[in-house]
Image: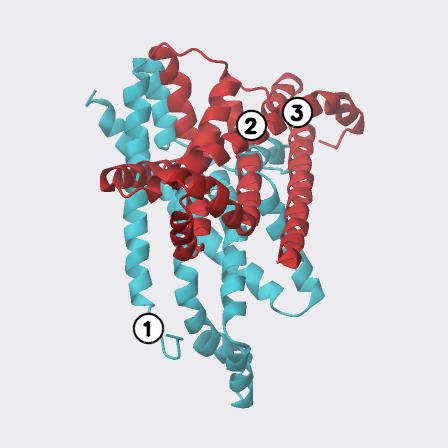
Amino acid sequence: MLHIVPTLLRGALVTGEVTGGAIIVASVSASCAVAMRLSGLAALDWPARVYIELFRGTSALIQLFWVFYALPLILPFRPTPMAAAIAVLGLNGGAYGAEILRGAILAVPKGQQDAAIALNFTPIVRMFRIILPQALPLIIPPLANLFIDMLKNSALAGLVQVSDITFQSQILQESTLRNAEVYGLALIIYFIMALILAGFMRFLEGCFKFPIGARV
Amino acid sequence: MTWDWKLVWHILPMILRGMVITIEATVLGMLLALVLGLIWAGLLLLPNRCIFWTMRAVIEFIRDTPLLIQLFFCYYVLPEIGITIPALVTGIAVLGINYSAYTAEVYRAGLQNIPSGQWDASKALNFTPWQTFIRIIVPQALPPIVPAMGNNLIAMFKDTPLLSTITVMEMLNRAMIIGDKTFHYLEPLTIVGVLFLLMSLLASGMIGITQRTLLVRR
């Protein structure tokens, strides 16, 4: 049974890459979407809304298959499985992240915004020095859940030929037929990865706990 | 490659038949999740520390591992231990058990919002703990958790395409089979995506309405 562990761990590395890449894509797309939604311009608000609804309203697996199988028929090129997986899982996570971020920003008391305007801060300074530092502690716990969801969703990448834990365990299952061991170990590896991610997020939570002006 | 409407009308009935299975899996899976989640939440309330920590560990494990691998595990391992059930039943069972880990959490939050005086009063009135739980606590805890359960329902609905990986003939599986046969992936996959989007929007609209009616009634 022990000889299947190294293969699965190689898969775990790829799972980590997919998840990490997707988290980066998600952070960028969520920030952009929230900036567009809070811009107050309908021309920016609507595209962001459509993006969020589109990715939250359909299933990640369908999005992945669509990009992997249907999109190359329209596009002049075919994205690599890894790129497709990172892009789809990232955009999917970004749509959920955008709602978390927006909720946290809107949860900062309106008076903070007004006071910052009264003090003649520019919109950029207002957002980055006043609003975001107060929103961050609210963001981290739901963000931890989102990142763990994204780690779990990265298992879908194995279905489009990314050689992650899922892919490796499918191959091992077919070659060894030791179903319980292979999939049991895959589950345990995912669980350990999730625990590590959760631990890291708790560490981050501690870092952002006491920003200036936070409500007690 | 252009969009072929003729193909769309040709394959739509087949995909809609898949939708019946998708809805079937969602409804039955959710029912299972609602029942199991309530049982887990009840067990977590028991004063027994051993049961509490075992349950917590199991729930945490289910929540922190991918549904896809859980499906594979059950699909391949159940026949080995002599349980041969149709793939759809395996899928519904795994969906139900997976989501019971989430519904248990929702129930727990709902139950914790009930003032402990309700338990004391029931004890004073000589109700058994079971009677108290079912007749006094649950009816009060239920309304606030409806929206959260609705979100779980939508999430489960969006997870049903995973059942295609264990040969269940739901929408995505049918779309992929059509694609493999005709090399037209664009139309079937887009139809499935649009159908999912419509159903999710419809469901979240309905949850919004339920939430508002419940708030008004209070």
Q: Nearer the viewer, mark 3 or mark 2?
A: 2
Q: Quadrant of the C terminus of chain A?
A: bottom left
Is residue A48 among the parts visible in the rendering? Answer: no
Q: Quadrant of the N terminus of chain A?
A: top left
- Badge 3 density bin: few <14, some 14–19, many ≥20, Cα 10 Å: some
* Residue A27 x, y percent position in the rendering: 46, 56
| Residue A35: quarter of image | bottom right
Q: Which mark is residue B28?
A: 2
Q: CA distance from mark 1 to mark 2?
A: 45 Å
**Quick one: A68 or A165, which is closer to the camera?**
A165
Answer with left or right where residue A179 lies relative to residue B178. left
| Chain ID of residue with mark 1 | A
Is residue B168 among the parts visible in the rendering? Answer: yes
The residue wearing badge 1 is: A210
In the rendered image of the structure, the colour used to display chain B is red
For the colour cyan, the matching chain is A
